[in-house]
Image (cartoon, helix red, strand yellow):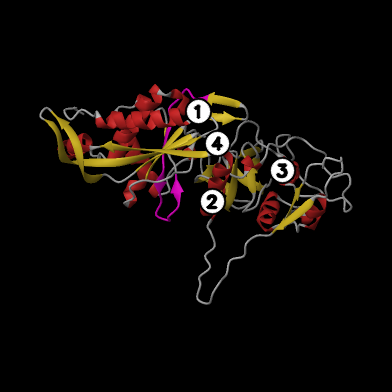
């Protein structure tokens, strides 16, 4: 049989690479079509890659722990007794392949890479540095001397992306502060300020817990988001009384009819969708100096995992679903997220995100934008409060169900007026909910 390359599959527009976490097959093992061959992990979800052909695994092109770009060959499948032959689509240097486009996966967002010479011409050791390592070094101001001092874990001592990313937080940085020339034209000497990482004091009895892979990726993604977007947060308190009363009235009937519980989440998402249609410039992304206005409304819903980590499955084309459809999709994604059953596509292509801090008893929060989106909304706990209401007989004080909405947005492209009007509009839709609505 002709040899077949097993390719790292496309896993959504925002995922450009994956880490091989384990091989399910060894060289020489027989493989059925659609049988899982290798386990992979992205910055968003764990998954398996199935074989596209029946045959025998004759070569692994990557090892456990290697980072592989989407579209690269990861294994060769052929007939028993064959040896692998070189094919044109197999990339010889794993770290030199760089995704084209607007990828925003945590590590690939470090830099956009352009082709460079394979070897640094003035390298005293004639050491090889891949284009990705070169780009990271240039972006972070790492000198050639620093590069040559890094201990490489790659083949022949080559510095890998992991090596340089591990080096960056611990390097000693020199910041040159230039003073303007004096009135007599003489330039004042430069002052160099040296800064070092802050050490953490560890006392007897302290427990050191290493971050798991997902926690490291979440940490990097959150820092990147804060570095990318100037965050502003606007707050509105919404009266949820009509919704609370309506849900209490229909929830048992809905469960019996649909075999699904109806929570507040799909109702809130429905209001957000309506507000996005009123203010479509919230449903955008930034690409350099360009604003990308999204056609689809894909709502991400932040979901806490049993491990304590967080994942954001996405409701695709959420505006095309009615409340029953939203309820079933929300429940399905939440259940599969908690049971580690999400597919890579389930967490891709979100355009706006909502996070429910109220599920932990919090009344409000300051959420971090889920890049490359430009806004996110946190909904707080629903609390009974005394409030002034207008009646035909005048103002009165009554017990109402209240909830805070916290809307964080990217001030590069969303000004306070738009950010504030949007969250107010969401609150309006919630407060105007029809208590006689049939579902």
Residue at left offset 75%, top offset 48%: 177
Q: 322 or 239, which is in the foreground?
A: 239
Range of the magenta residues? 293-311
Residue 219 to residue 250: above or below: below
Structural distance between the alpha carbons of marks 3 and 1: 26 Å
Structural distance between the alpha carbons of marks 1 and 4: 15 Å
Residue 96 to residue 165: above or below: above
Classify mark 1: residues with Cα within 10 Å, few (<14), some (14-19) or many (20+): many
Disc 3 vs disc 2: Cβ atoms closer than 8 Å?
A: no
Classify mark 3: residues with Cα within 10 Å, few (<14), some (14-19) or many (20+): few
Asked if the magenta segment contains residue 300, the reply would be yes
Residue 428: x, y in percent?
A: 30, 29
Classify mark 2: residues with Cα within 10 Å, few (<14), some (14-19) or many (20+): some
Label 1: which secondary element: strand
Q: Which residue is mark 4?
A: 14
Whether residue 91 is visible, yes or no, is: yes
Q: Which residue is mark 2?
A: 219
Asked if the magenta segment contains residue 415, the reply would be no
Residue 365: x, y in percent?
A: 40, 46
């Amino acid at each position: 049989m002709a040899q077949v390359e097993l390719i790292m599959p496309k896993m959504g527009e925002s995922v450009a690479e994956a880490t091989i976490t384990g091989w399910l097959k060894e060289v020489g093992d027989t493989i059925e079509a659609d049988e899982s061959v290798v386990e992979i992990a992205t910055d968003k979800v764990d998954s398996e890659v199935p074989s596209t052909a029946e045959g025998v695994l004759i070569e692994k092109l990557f090892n456990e722990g290697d980072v592989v770009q989407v579209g690269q060959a990861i294994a060769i499948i052929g007939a028993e007794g064959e040896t692998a032959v070189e094919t044109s689509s197999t990339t010889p240097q794993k770290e030199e392949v760089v995704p084209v486009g607007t990828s925003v996966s945590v590590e690939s967002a470090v830099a956009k890479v352009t082709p460079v010479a394979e070897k640094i011409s003035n390298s005293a050791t004639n050491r090889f540095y891949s284009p990705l390592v070169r780009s990271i070094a240039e972006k972070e101001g790492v000198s050639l001397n620093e590069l040559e001092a890094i201990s490489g874990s790659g083949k022949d001592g080559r510095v890998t992306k992991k090596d340089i990313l591990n080096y960056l937080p611990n390097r000693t940085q020199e910041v040159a502060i230039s003073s303007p020339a004096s009135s007599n034209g003489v330039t004042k000497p430069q002052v160099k300020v040296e800064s070092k990482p802050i050490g953490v004091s560890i006392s007897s009895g302290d427990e050191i817990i290493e971050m798991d892979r997902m926690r490291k990726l979440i940490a990097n993604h959150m820092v990147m988001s804060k570095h990318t977007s100037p965050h502003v947060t606007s707050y509105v308190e919404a009266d949820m009384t009509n919704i609370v009363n309506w849900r209490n009235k229909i929830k048992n009937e809905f469960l019996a009819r649909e075999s699904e519980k109806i929570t507040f989440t799909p109702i809130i998402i429905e209001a957000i969708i309506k507000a996005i249609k009123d203010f479509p410039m919230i449903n955008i992304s930034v690409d350099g100096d360009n604003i990308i206005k999204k056609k689809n409304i894909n709502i991400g819903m932040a979901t806490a995992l049993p491990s304590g980590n967080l994942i954001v499955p996405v409701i695709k084309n959420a505006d095309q679903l009615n409340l029953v459809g939203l309820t079933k999709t929300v429940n399905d994604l939440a259940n599969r997220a908690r049971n580690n059953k999400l597919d890579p596509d389930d967490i891709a292509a979100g355009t706006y995100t909502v996070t429910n801090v109220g599920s932990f008893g919090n009344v409000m929060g300051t959420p971090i934008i889920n890049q490359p989106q430009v806004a996110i909304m946190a909904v707080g706990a629903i609390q009974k409060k005394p409030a002034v209401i207008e009646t035909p007989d005048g103002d009165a004080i009554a017990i109402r169900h209240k909830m805070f909405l916290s809307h964080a947005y990217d001030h590069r492209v969303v000004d306070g007026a738009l950010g504030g009007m949007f969250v107010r509009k969401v609150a309006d839709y919630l407060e105007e909910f029809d208590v006689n609505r049939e579902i």
